Amino acid sequence: MRLNYPSNIKIINVPCTGRVDILHLLKAVEDGADGVYVAGCLEGDCHYVSGNLKAKRRVTYVKKVLEDIGLEPERVEMYNLSAAQGTRFAEIAREFTERIRELGPSPVGSGAKAA
Amino acid sequence: MVVAESKPIEEILAMVADFDKILLTGCKGCVTVCNAGGQKEVGILASALKIARKKEGREIEIEEITLERQCDPEYIDQLEEPIANDKYEAVVSMACSVGPQYIAKRYEDMLVFPALNTTFIGGSLEHGVWAEFCQACGSCGIHNFGTLCPIARCAKSLLNGPCGGSAGGKCEISPEIDCVWHLIYERMSRLGQVDKMANVVMFKDWTTSRDGGPRKIVREDLKQ
């Protein structure tokens, strides 16, 4: 499809979003990412049954931690889309980048890119 | 196990506000099992504290270490090297409150802070859910109550049947809390022991509990 999405997005592959840990998300923020989002499969469509639901709960936990320490919880997000939704993937990348741009650079930041 | 939960991060941040180098110590005992103070939780708290301090423009250096247990002096020895080097201004313990007390006792000049609220003696109902089952009264009599503890599990610690607030098997303090006396009746009925419930249980001797002051067990066969 040769779709474009913002070049500031750095993709980290995991076998399933169920592998994404609270610490992975926090470390990204700690190391200066302005925002982090998890792109999981559609709810109900997880090959491992509940990986994306577990990721969703972890994202919620990290949002709460960020809120508690005075950072915008919107810097972390969970999205659901299927591997066949390339258009949606690019749309989410643009949407999230725009959200982070509005929030501005992370006060923790060292200029790292959104992941 | 001893069940604990993390203090609010704001409270921990306030504790370490004056320090730039701290040692964050987890425990591989009960608090690992109840996901409050094991290696993983140490990592998460360290990261959250670092993020908060970076945000303030005043970074904090945190060394993470998780001890086998913090309630045995021999394992506190594992802190010898990091603390002896005099690198840290304070220690934050993620054990139950026994841990920070043991560390403070060993290192008399070191400031030690608790990162957890030690909550109760209990067990897990499902992953991520824990409940209180024991109040450590010091003289267990649960066999008289269908092997269910009315001291810990009845809001009023009643010993001779439910109060008037029991309704539909639930306690009046919350619809989510079972009336333990309802459970005791059901279980004793199943065991054919319901007639034993007519026996009057006399007032409890609380001297084995906290009313007798701080408790201690001495096993002469084990002492060295």
Image (cartoon, coloured by chain):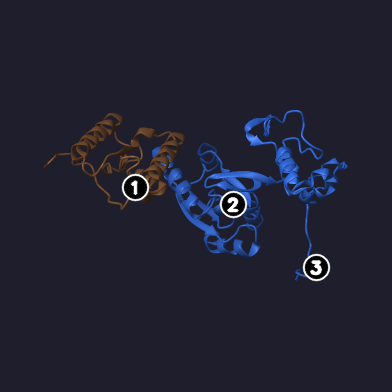
Chain colours: A brown, B blue
Q: Which residue is mark 3?
A: B220
Residues at marks 3 and 2, common chain? yes
Q: SS at mark 1?
A: helix
Image vertical order of residue B88 relative to residue A111, above or below = below
Distance Cα–Cα, label 3 vs label 1: 54 Å
Residue B92: x %, y % from top left: 55, 49
Q: Are marks 3 and 2 in contact (CB under 8 Å)?
A: no
> Local crowd at mark 3 within 10 Å, few (<14), some, or many (≥20)?
few
Task: Residue type at mark 1: give it.
Answer: Thr
Tag on residue A17?
Answer: 1
Given residues B54 and B177, the one toward you in this image is B177
Residue A25 image position (x, y, % from top left): 37, 45
Judging from the image, what secondary structure is the residue with disc 2 in?
Answer: loop
Q: Chain of mark 1?
A: A
Q: What is the chain letter for disc 3? A: B
Residue located beneath label 2 in the image: B95
Q: Earlier in the sequence, mark 3 or mark 2?
A: 2
Q: Decide if residue B119 is in sight here.
A: no
Mark 2 vs mark 1: tell me if same chain: no
Q: Is residue B12 left or right of residue B73?
A: left
B219, B131: nearer the viewer: B131
Three-letter code, disc 3: Glu
